[in-house]
Amino acid sequence: MTNQTALPHDHEHCIDSALTLARELCTERAVKLTPIREKVLEIVWRSHKPVGAYDVLDTLARSHKAARPPTVYRALDFLMAEGLIHKIESLNAYLGCGEAGHAHESQFLICRTCGTAEEIVDGALDAALDAATKRSGFAVERKVVEIAGKCRRCQMA
Ligand SMILES: [Zn+2]
Ligand SMILES: [Zn+2]
Ligand SMILES: [Zn+2]
């Protein structure tokens, strides 16, 4: 799924499989995917462009009039804790995870032209980072690899 991000594809399929997987994982883990949490996940998955919390709120408020920023932040925190979405730090925005259910470190390719972000999961890259930080004796708290540029589709356009 992830390597198709920048190519035309059936995005309804991405949304469907993400929501189905989220329901399964939450059932397995005995955590509650409340209607609000599920709706927020669906909003984040509307495209492969990372979406900010206030944009999520704008969309959510159309169906849930009582939704307020804390509602959205709580739902986003839950979804992150369950590994269903990632935060893109450089954009202060959220992206659906295409690898939910598998422990992974991810790297992100962020297109500055169309705004899509592609998640790549490269174990070799992650191992190289681990080795490099270890050599420096650095205690890592958070690893963020976000690469800005132009996606395949935008280069062809
Ligand atoms: Zn898609
Ligand atoms: Zn992921
Ligand atoms: Zn692009």
Image (cartoon, rainbow, N blue to C red):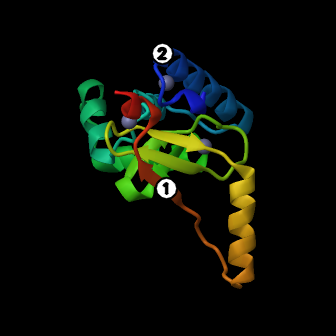
The kind of secondary structure element at disc 2 is: helix
The kind of secondary structure element at disc 1 is: strand
Q: Position of residue 140 (x, y in %)?
A: 64, 74
> Label 2 belongs to which residue?
12
Label whose residue precedes the other's in the sequence (1 or 2): 2
**Ligand 3, image quadrant it occupies:** top left
| Side of 146 relative to 23 (left or right) | left
Report the Cα–Cα distance between label 1 and label 2.
26 Å
Q: Which mark is residue 146?
A: 1
| Side of 133 relative to 47 (left or right) | right
| Side of 139 relative to 11 (left or right) | right
Q: Position of residue 130 (x, y in %)?
A: 72, 68
Could one spot residue 145 in this view of the protein? Answer: yes
> Residue 82 occupies which quadrant of the picture?
top right
Could one spot residue 43 in this view of the protein? Answer: no
Q: Position of residue 134 (x, y in %)?
A: 74, 78
Q: Quadrant of the N terminus?
A: top right
Up-down: is 17 above or below 145? above
